[in-house]
Every structure is written in structure tokens, then in C-alpha cells.
Image (spheres, rainbow, N blue to C red):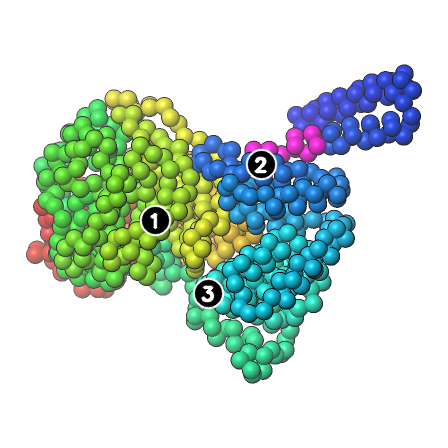
Amino acid sequence: MFTTGAHSQYTQQRRFYIGSLCVGILCYTLGIPAALQAQVFAVEAVAAADVTVDAGGDSTSPHKMPGFSISVDEKKLNLLDDYERYVRHQMWEKALTALKELSETKSTSPLLPTKDGFLVDAEQRIFMALVSMPAEGREAFRLFFDGKARKQFEELSAQKGLITPDRINKAKQIYSQYFLTSIGDDVADLLGNDAFERGEFSQAARFWGSILDHHPDTNLSEIELNVKSALALIRSRQLERAAANIQVIAQQFPDEKIKLGGDDVNPVPYLQALIPQGAATQSPATPQQNRIANLLRQPLDLAPENVKPEWQLSYLDQAMVQAIENSRRNYYGRGKSYETFVPPMAVDEKRAYFNFYGVCFCVDLQTGKLVWRTDKFQDLGTHFSNYSFHQSSNPAQYQISVTNDIVLATLIPKKEMNHYRARYRLYAFNGATGKQLWTSNVSNESFLSKPLVEGDHVYVVSHLQNNKSLTLNCLSLKTGKKEWSLKLGAAVSTSNVNGMQKMPIPLLQKEGDNLLVLTNNGALFEISIPTKSINWVFRYPYKVNQSNTHYYNAPVPEETELHSEGQMFRDQNLVYFKEAGATEVYALDLVEKRLVWKRPIKKSAQIVGLDQKNVYLMSKELEALDRKTHRLNWAVSLPVAAGGLSALFASEEAWVFTSRGIFEISKTNGDILNIYRGSDKTSLGGAIELRKGLVICVSNQAVTAYPASSSAKSLPPSGKAKSGP
């Protein structure tokens, strides 16, 4: 029995046979010479081969996949396709002509697609096509271009004086067009030295790395190239890749010394001393970014039932609970699940900060006292029954972060909550007092992502109202003024129950000089901060349901009830992510730029942790996926009924805050080991976090702190339970 693929191949072969027979009969009838007949058959064979190749895989280009829209230069893409087709058929003269035209044509877009789902810098993509040429093609390339390339490089080297921007641009043209010639390594070394001197360390590492990877007959010192590349990687804080270079030096050039600063130096200990202690092996979780889960040093020893929490603060009174309940029953509130919303939290050394529908408040970690709040909680009640608020409100857009005693929050100002299509502003508050420091008030701009702070800069994604294009912004932490911005592309938005536009909420994560932006809409970006440009984009299908199915009395989808968010966790060069509303989880190798694996998962699942063995996802169950095989190792159902999906992990156990208390779960097989009911017994559960020796549980109505060890002193609840309103 034929499979579908075999049947398709058989049909294609049969068509080719019949077509060839017809051509042969025609040639015989017309008296065409045998040599010409052979050429006709050869052309037919080439065409058939092309069809077979195209039919064998997914021909959808990354920029044409459903979801996030990114423009590319179609003219250059067509030239690139022509070049690669000529290479496949060893038509070297046509291939080199197409490559020359490709290099000289000006781009209308900075990106071109690869065959692995990536869109990369156009020059880099052309360079990738060049260095992937087989040995026979490389010989033809040198035969055609070596003399011209050598002449241009000699003219460039003959110019005396400082290396000007014009000379660097000329060198880059030679590099991109003639790297495979005999002078390709020399021009790459020149560009690497220049980039390093100007502080563009990532670019320097790329130039030197291209010699090591793609110019095997270089006359330059291989050990020096590895040392320079490692230095550039350390300076750009790409420490894992730097460690790999150091290992190569130690293995291939043991005890060999080089000149550094006029002295003979053993490069291995010298380079190792430049890497911050433990940086290559540790991957701590930080408030700004999720990396491999920082395993607890020892398991939690939670308090027994008769021991009270360290403190508890309830931020909802009965009037607010009733207002939310009324909103849930209201037609215009359907699908938002206000009653299951858990306010996002940010924590520093002294305080915890929360953003509850634009009411930001601060809690002292030691005492549990309410330090400050921006508004009264009761005042929110009137907004839950307001038509305009239901139109504009998106709970996922309420974000908060803290750094250096400055709290950043995205919210709709209280006075604008009743406005039609209200915008989300970015506010900065003093962490100790709650005093407003500044607000970013760009006309018609609405902020989407959680602000990420690095040094004196704030990175945040925004869009203009009535516009689906996303923009990455870099703002001054002190003033909120925009320093620079970068257009990313156009999102595919969904509609809320009122037919209003609902934008995706991007996630930002910084590593060295690069910034990862997960759009939650079908695209993962890597942005170079020094050059303010896109390094690459990984695209994958993201189908958005544009129909409105949240009718009155219709069941709320699980992902809406749980406020499932897109999330990514990183371990060295591997990143694991799943977007909000998507049905697949991905593992991506960032260095090799390849998809390691992907597997289907339910839409409501959210990644909550990562260790050396498993990726952990949570919905109404906690699931452990094997990192290598992506198989399901185990799953356990839990009474999860609210947002704030999160978990704590030790070497053998995990803890989840649910509507029935804190569940302790075995990481070996998913068995439930213990259940701690706690003191927030009327809530729906929520987020859990360990800070300053406290297990902090944030529910849909209160914040509760338990001692991480039952041996810790616990005070009675009198005088310790605080009410927010």
C-alpha cells in the first residue's frame, strides 16, 4: 500500500515519464539531433527535481506564517532563491552572478528569512548563503573574484592615516561580497579589530568567529583569533560562548603563550580570570528575567496548621468583593475573570509592591504593614460596572517592577478609567514613599510589557492606539524621556467581548548586550542594544481566533480564568518558551539558531520553572516535560482556580499555592506529599514566591507571608493582620 508521500512521488515520476516520452516522440518526428534531445531531457529533469524538493517540506517562509507580521525585501528574497537554486544544480556562473547582484542591491528591509524559521539581518543572511557554498563552488568563486577582491583590499590597505567610517564601510562591502577569497580572513580581522576598539564587542566576536568557522586555510594565528574572540565574548557578556572558546584553546594549544601587553602570557588562566566567579555555571533568577530556576538550597519546612503566618494583609473589603461579583455577572464583564485576577508583584530587599487594577501599593516585608498606596481600593468598585472600563481594561496590561528604590508600573490613570479606549501609561514611584517621580506621556501611546530596567535605562514595548505595530522603547530611568526606539512589526490582535482590540503582552529578557522580546504573537526577537538593531527573529505559526465566543452565560475559557501568560526560561544557550494563547512549547538553541524541539500543549498551560531535567508547565495541573526528549514525565491535577501561575522548586520537591492551600509535590513522580492549608482559606489561590526567608503567597484577595522554616519564630495574628482598605 502506498503512503501519501509515496503516492505523490509515484504520480510525479509517472508525469515525468509520460512528459519525457512525448518530448522524445516529438523530437524524433521533427528530426531533432540526439545532443539537443539530451539537453531537453536535462531541463525536464532539473524541473522535476525542483518540484520534488519543494514538495518534500514546508515551503512557508517565516515572514508569511500566520501571526506577527514582519516585512522583508521580496526582490532580494527572489534573488536569494535564484542563487540557492543555481548552487543546488552546480550552475556556478549563474550562481555567482546572482550573488553579486544580491550583494549590490539596496535593501528595503533589514531582514531576510532562513530555512529554519528565522529571519536574520540581510547582510548576515547573504553571508550565510555564501559560506554554505560547497567546495567546488568555492573554487569557482575564487577563480572569478580573487583578483578583484585582492585589488580592492590592497587599495584600502594603501590608504594612510586613521581608519575612517568610509574605509570601514568599504571593508564591510569586501567582507560581505568576497569573504571566500584569499583576503577574506584579513578583512574580517581588520573589521574585528576596529569593532573591538569602538566597543562593539559582539560585532568583533562575529568577525573573528567567521574566520575560525568558515576560513580554514587562513594564514592568521588560530590561537590569537580564539583569544581575541574570547575577549570580545567576555566583554559582551556572552560568557557561555567565551567559556567554549577557552576550552578550545586549552585543548588545542596546551601551555602555548601569546603576547599580551608586551608580555608572554598563558591565555587560558588569563581569560578565566576575566570571567566573573561562578558566572559560567550559575544562572540565578532575577526579577527582570526568568532563567533556569534557582533551586532552593534546602526544601521548605512549612509551618504546621497551628502555627500562624508571619503576617497577612487583605486588600479587599466586602464592598469590593461584591463589586467584582456584580461585574462577573454583568454582560460586559464576561471573559475578563476579574474575580480570579491576582495582582502582579515586584520585590526588593525591604518591600513588596503590587499593582491591583492601577492601585499600586507597598507592603513592608518584615512587618506586613501597608507602607503606601496610590488610591483607595474602594474607589475601584465604581469602575467595574462602567462600560468604558470594560472596553479598555485588559488585566494582563497591569504590570509592575522595581529597581534601585524606583517602582515602575503600567496602568490606566484613575481619572481616565471611564474614557473610551483609555491608554496604559508608564508611571515611576519612589519605592519608600510612593511619591510619583514621572510619567511617560507620549501622545496616543499605550504601554504593553512589563518594564525591564538595566542600569539607567528602561526597556518597554508600546503601541499607538488604533495601531497594531509594536515598538521597543529605551527610556531614561531618571526622567522617563525616550532615548531611542525600534519598530518591531505588526501584531495580530484579538477582540474582547465588546469587539474591542486586545493586544498581545510581550515579555522582555536581557542577556549581555542582547535583549530577547517574546511578542506572545508568533515571533521571538533578539535585539542588539549597542547597535539598536534586530539580530534575528524566530517565527512560528500563531493562529488567532478573531471570532467572539464569550457570550453571556457561556463558560469562561480556562486560559482566561487562569490569566495564563506567555513565559520563557533560559539555560545558557537554550531558551524554552510558550506564548499566551498558543498550543505549543518550544526549545530553541540561540547560538546555532535552530529549533531543538517543539511539542503540543494545551492553551491554558504556562511555563513556571526549569531545572536540569524538566520543563514545568502549570494550568489546572502541574506537568513535567523532559528537556531532552520533550516527553511527559508526569502530571498531577491541582485545585488551581486563579491567576498568578507560579511554583517554588527544590532539588526533590515543588510547592504550588492553590485554592486549597499550598501543595508539596514530588518532582520524581508528581505525587502529592503534603498539603498546608494556611490562613488565606477563602481565596482562590495564586502566586507563590520565596524572599528574605518568607514564603509569600499572593491571592485574589490577600498577601500572606509564612516562615520558610517551621523552626522560625511565629507571632500570633493579633496586631499582625492588616487590612488594605
Which residue does the image show at 46% across and 49% down from the upper left? 534
Q: Is residue 709 above or below residue 98?
A: below
Dot 1 lies on which element?
A: strand
| Quadrant hosting residue 418 | top left
Q: Is residue 254 left or right of residue 24?
A: left
Q: Is residue 327 left or right of residue 58?
A: left
Q: Is residue 638 visible?
A: no
Query: Marks 2 and 1: which is nearer the front?
Result: 2
Dot 2 amino acid type: Lys
Residue 75's mark? 2
Q: Of the residues under marks 1 and 3, which one precedes in the sequence?
A: 3
Q: Is residue 257 left or right of residue 664?
A: right
Distance from disc 2 to disc 3, alpha carbons, whole Å, reads 34 Å
Q: Of the residues under marks 2 and 1, which one precedes in the sequence?
A: 2
State the count of labels.
Answer: 3
**Which portion, as a residue range, is magenta?**
50-61
| Quadrant hosting residue 101 | top right
Dot 2 lies on which element?
A: helix
Residue 473's mark? 1
Q: Is residue 523 visible?
A: yes
Residue 298's mark? none
Distance from disc 2 to disc 1, alpha carbons, whole Å, reads 30 Å
Distance from disc 1 to disc 3, alpha carbons, whole Å, reads 22 Å
Which residue does the image show at 44% across and 31% down from the upper left? 543
Which residue does the image show at 66% across and 37% down from the upper left? 82
Image coordinates for residue 287, horizontal then vertical, percent: 32, 56
Q: Is residue 270 above or below residue 87?
A: below
